Amino acid sequence: MSKLLKWLIGLALVAGIAAAAYQLVVPPSDTTVAGRPGGKGAFRGKGGANRGDAVPVLAAAAQTANVPIYFDGLGTARALNMVTVQPQVDGRLLNVGFMEGQDVKRGDVLARIDPAIYQAQLDQALAKKAQDEAQLSDARLELSRVSKVGPIATLQKAVDTARAKVAQFEALVASDQAAIDLARTQLSYTTITAPIDGHTGIRMVDEGNIVRAGSTPGIVVITQVQPIAVLFNLPQQQLARVNAAILGASPKGELAAEAIAPDGRTIVDRGVLRVVDNQVDQTTGTIRLKAEFPNKTLALWPGQFINIRIEVENLRAATIIPTASVQQGPNGSFVYVVSADGTAKMRSVRIATQDERLAAISEGVQPGEQIITSSFSRLREDTPVSVTVQPITGPGENETAVQPARGQLSPSPPEAKRERGKAGGEGRRDKRPDATGSIDTPSVIPGNTPTAESPRKGAVSQ
C-alpha cells in the first residue's frame, strides 16, 4: 500500500473522530426553521395549536336580511283568451284583411266572403214583407167598413171574418220581419271581424277558396297575450299555506307571483295569483293554480314552459348563511364557526328554511359570525384554520356582496409567499391577532373584493 493511500485513510479517520466529538460537546441549535414544530418562528395558538398547520378554508359572515319564502312550480303559459276564427256562412273567400303575426283590435276586418247570395236572400225577404204588409192594409180597411154596419147577425159574421184576416196578415208580416233579420244577419257574416284584441297566428286558408260554416281548421287563431296566464301545479300539502297567504295578502287575495327564467335567477315577469282550483287532482295529489302576468315585453308566449314561484311568507330580519356551510350529523344540522382564537368550533343550528344557495337560521348563529364553507373533511373541533373571506351571494336579483365582519384571518396565499420572502433565515411568522381578535386587513379571494353595500333581500324557495 502506497504512502499516499495510507495518508488519506488516516485523514478520513481523524475527520470522523472530530465530527463525533463535536456532536457530543456542542448542544443542538435553537434556530429551527420557522413554522415547524419547536422552532422559534412557530406560532402556537390557544391550547398549543400550531398555526403553521392551520387548515385553509373559505368562510362567509352571517348576515341579517328579509327572506321571502317561495313555493315553486313548473307552469305552462296560456293565452288569457284564444279564439279560432271560423266562417259562419258558406261562400268563396274574396279577400283576407290581415297579415300573419299582426296585432288586431276588436272589430277589425279580417276577411270577406262573397255576399251575393245573402244579399239576394235579404232582398227577397224584404219584398215578401212588402207584399204581406199590403194585404194587411187591405184587410184592415175591410174590417173598418163592415164594423160600421148595425148589429145584424149576418153582418156580424163578416166583421169576425175580417178581423181574423187582419190578424193573419199581421202574423205574416211578423214572419217576414224575422226572415229579414235572418237574411241581414247572414249577410253580416260575410264580413269576418276580430272578436277580441290579440295577436294573429299563421293564416290557415287563402283567398279564393270556398269556405264552409264551422269548417276546421278555420281562418286564423287570435291569442290575447297581454296580459297572459300561466297554469301550474303545487303539491296538495302546500295548499293550506297558500290559502293562508291569500287570506293575509294585501290587497286582499292578490298573492305575488314571479315567472323565472331557466337559469333560476332572472325574473322574467311579475304578476299575481288569480285562481286556486276548487279541487285536488286525486291522480297526482296536486292542486292547479292560475297566475296572470302583464307580459309587457312579450317574454311569455302561449304554450311555453316557465318556472313559477309565489311568495307565501317573508321572514323579517332573518340570519342568513350559505347553504354550503350546513352539515348533517347524528344530532342534526351543524356548522363550523371561526372562533376568536382562529380555530373551528362546531355549532348546532336550527334551519327555518333553505334553498340551494341560502339558509335562514332561526337558532345557533348570530349575525357577523364567520361560517366556514369549505374543507369540512379536514375539520374537527378546535382545528386551527386559515380563513379567506368570500361574500354571501343570493339568488337572482337578490344577489348581494356583503362586507364580511372583521375577525381573525391569516394572510391569503399570495401574502404568505411575500411573508416567506421577507422572513429570510428567521422563517415565516403568521400575523398575530390583536386584542380584539382581528388583524389590520381582512383577506379576500383575489378578484372578489367584497363591497361595503348593505345586504338586500335574500330569497329562499321551498
Image (tube, rainbow, N blue to C red):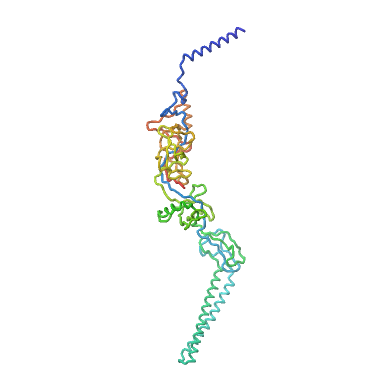
Which residue is farthest top? 3
| Between 214 and 94, the one nearer to me in the picture | 214
Which residue is farthest front? 330
| Between 285 and 201, the one nearer to me in the picture | 285
State the image quarter where residue 456 is shown: top left
Q: Is residue 422 above or below residue 159?
A: above
State the image quarter where residue 432 is shown: top left
Q: Is residue 29 above or below residue 362?
A: above
Q: Where the N terminus falls, by quadrant?
A: top right
Name the spot of residue 54 as percent of width and height, x first: 46, 31
Which residue is farthest left? 435
Name the spot of residue 60 as percent of width and height, x first: 44, 38
> Looking at the image, can residue 268 be seen?
no
Taking the spot 41% from the left edge, 38% from the top edge, the residue there is 369
Count of labels in the image: 0
> Looking at the image, can residue 369 be seen?
yes
Name the spot of residue 174 as percent of width and height, x first: 51, 78
| Between 236 and 131, the one nearer to me in the picture | 236
Name the spot of residue 163 as percent of width and height, x first: 49, 85
Is residue 206 toward the left or the right of residue 441 in the image? right
Q: Is residue 149 above or below residue 43?
A: below
